[in-house]
Amino acid sequence: MLGIDIGTSGCKITAMDVDGHILDEGFSEYETAHPRPGHAEQNPEDWCSAVRDILAGMRQRGVVDFRTITGIALDGSTHNAVLLNKRMEIVRPTIMWTDLRSAIEAEELNRNHGDLIFRTALQVAAPTWTFPQMLWLQRHEPEVLGRTAHMMFVKDYVRWRLTGQWCTDVIDAQGTLFFDMSRLDWSPELCALAGIPAKILPPLARPTDVVGKITPAGATEFGLPAGVPVVCGTSDVAVEDYAAGALEPGSCILKLATAGNVNVMTSRPVPDSRTLTYSHVIPGVWFTVAATNTAARAQRWFRDLFCGAEQETARRENRSIYQIMDDIAAGSKPGADGLFFHPYLQGERSPYWDPKLRASFVGATMRHTKADFMRAVLEGVVYSLRDCFRTIERLELPVNDIRLIGGGAKSPLWRQIIADVFGRKISIPKNCDASFGSALLAGVGTGTFRDEREAVRQCLREADPVAPVPANQDRYAKLFPMYQRIHDALEGVYQEMNSL
């Protein structure tokens, strides 16, 4: 079974057997363009190129015989519309969920139509969502929408290149603000409000539905056998929750990836203006999301700007740059000697929903070292996740267990900081990346597994949990309120800075 994850920062592909053993994996990064301040775009061709490169590497290694692949499923980042013309050609680069250009449109939607949107879609408009992005295009690039005949989303575009079939799943569709959550179908009212013809939206499927087979053209382009069944798949967030074993109400997922999520499984929708609401891969289960825009991406930002020497060491010693950065950061004590970092490099979602917030280091002195700054970045991201968790607490949602996933979960130091700041035992599922979850969906959809739960029970394994260190927990309990007060003190300053 093959799982293909088209993430925000790169593509990962996992080949897995029926017992959950990873046979081979590959990863390839691609760039996000920032043509203007606050803008973030990607070229869908880069996603396909990354898939081709990874598959070529797998073929070269020869660990997996592609002729034995029984099914493929894909997932991708949410909200990102791929616009195509009548000839199925890309009309413009895809506006990403991190893009802030539609902040004015989102504010207007909430002010003028907020009740209708929330009642129908169970969400509050923000620049993250497809709806305000399309309003921005109507005002600034009307010719783009005039040429648009089809809309699909990240995973759907790559799957279309594989199969020639145009569709999306009901969970990814919920990330548009064009969706009626009570009917689990596109909303004619919201489409009309957006000025989007409903006919350009893709047909809907379930995440485990087989929606096509690899065509001869897809086989030629990607080097896969023609005729292999392809399962619809879903959003990266939904499939990660599923792959990590969060199958029942009360399970909580902390995601430490490009962005950061606190996702709590529920037995029913719990709509709230401070959170996001989605249905789960498993029918009858839902999840509530409190999300921070910048998590592991903050560490990558620090790496690119300030860690040239460390990157050279990593290349010379054939080591991970992040392992080197962790080793350095571990030389700073909990609390980073009083240095705070607020990771609002791309504005913020939960709990503030303010695209104008900015990142900051606060408390720097001559005695602070590079290790302190590195640790402050890690701690600041965790404080931001803890801020998100406050929203969950205010909703009084039960949390029975916490599971940590995402690329950042591979860092022992970051894992310990999370346990210390949250003051709770943290479980670490093994092999629960989105691509692993998509491979599970491929198995469910093609009948390898009886249902979604059996796939996880048969394939998921967990590492030893991480428990908080009492002394560190006490220290962070004093520092977190300071982190919050710094935000409150600087919030007005950020607004002034954005008006300059």
Image: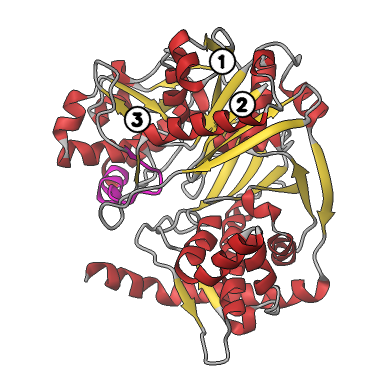
Residue 239: which quarter of the image?
top right
| Amino acid bearing label 3 | Val
Vertical relation: 378 (above or below) 320: below
Using the numbered discs, state the Cα–Cα distance from disc 1 to disc 3 in whole angstroms: 20 Å
Q: Is residue 357 left or right of residue 439?
A: left
Q: Is residue 320 left or right of residue 91?
A: right
Q: Residues within 10 Å of mark 1 (few under 14, many from 20)?
A: many
Using the numbered discs, state the Cα–Cα distance from disc 1 to disc 2 in whole angstroms: 19 Å
Q: Are marks 1 and 2 in contact (CB under 8 Å)?
A: no
Residue designated by label 2: 59
The residues colored magenta run 94-110
Residue designated by label 3: 82
Judged from this view, the residue extending furthest toward the right is: 464
The spot of residue 71 in percent (x, y) is 63, 16
**Which badge, 3 or 2, is on the more N-terminal residue?**
2
Residue designated by label 1: 230
Between marks 3 and 2 in the image, the one whose residue lies nearer the viewer: 2
Residue nearest the observer in this picture, 156 or 170: 156
**Which badge, 1 or 3, is on the more N-terminal residue?**
3
Q: Secondary structure at mark 3?
A: strand
Residue nearest the observer in this picture, 325 or 181: 325
The number of numbered badges drawn on the structure is: 3
